[in-house]
Image (cartoon, helix red, strand yellow):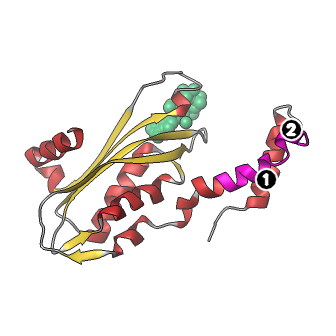
Amino acid sequence: MSSVNKPQIEQAIRLLLEAIGEDPNREGLLDTPKRVAKMYEEVFSGLNEDPKEHFKTVFGEDHEELVLVKDIPFYSMCEHHLVPFYGRAHVAYIPKGGKVTGLSKLARAVEAVAKRPQLQERITSTVADSIVESLDPHGVMVVVEAEHMCMTMRGVKKPGAMTITSAVRGILQSDAAARAEVLSLMKA
Ligand SMILES: Nc1nc2c(ncn2[C@@H]2O[C@H](COP(=O)(O)OP(=O)(O)OP(=O)(O)O)[C@@H](O)[C@H]2O)c(=O)[nH]1
Ligand SMILES: [Zn+2]
């Protein structure tokens, strides 16, 4: 079920168009409020999702070694300017007690968290903490690399500048050698 109020978004977009000096009744813009409402429903669909729900899929596999899914593409919306930021997430964890989740669930958790008005730091730490809370693993490391359109098309105008954030939990926080190994696999 959607949490966005589409008629209200349509109304707001008509006002916005008027405010920038456009005519919301000209032919090319007639369906724009409806399209934008539909788009926001899609790009903010993560507001209805708890990333931890995805980790209910657990296999009782006795693997207490690294699992890494890297290069997970994501698109999010910067909560300061409501323009996109996008890039790749790398999610690693070391399972404990047979709590191994489905690989796709790591990517689903990234999607759920990204599809909200966001900060890159919060995407990173929310994904890491969801894994810790759901799977109680030995360790977790999430690295996110992204380009922010608010730094590219406006403001400071620095296309190509990449922001990298990480969140490290458990043994990957306390053991520098293990952390370095995960980092090198993420970069490989
Ligand atoms: N920490 C963090 N900052 C972000 C993120 N996305 C955008 N920002 C920053 O949020 C800040 C908002 O700064 P403000 O001074 O309030 O807004 P502004 O005048 O539009 O800032 P400029 O972008 O510098 O023009 C900017 O520095 C953005 O680069 C993010 O994911 N994390
Ligand atoms: Zn921004």
The verdict on residue 18 being magenta is no
Q: Is residue 148 above or below residue 168?
A: above
Between 163 and 54, the residue placed more toward the observer is 54
Structural crowding at the residue carrying mark 2, measured as other residues with C-alpha within 10 Å and reported as few (<14), some (14–19) or many (≥20): few
Quadrant in which residue 176 is drawn: top left
Q: Is residue 171 left or right of residue 116?
A: left
Q: Secondary structure at mark 1?
A: helix
Check residue 18 in the rendering and tell me which mark sits there, or answer none.
2
For this orientation, the residue located farthest to the top is: 157
For this orientation, the residue located farthest to the front is: 27
- In percent of width and height, residue 53 lies at 41, 72
Q: Which residue is mark 1?
A: 10
Q: Is residue 23 left or right of residue 58?
A: right
- In percent of width and height, residue 129 lies at 33, 60
* Quadrant hosting ligand 2: top right
The verdict on residue 26 being magenta is yes
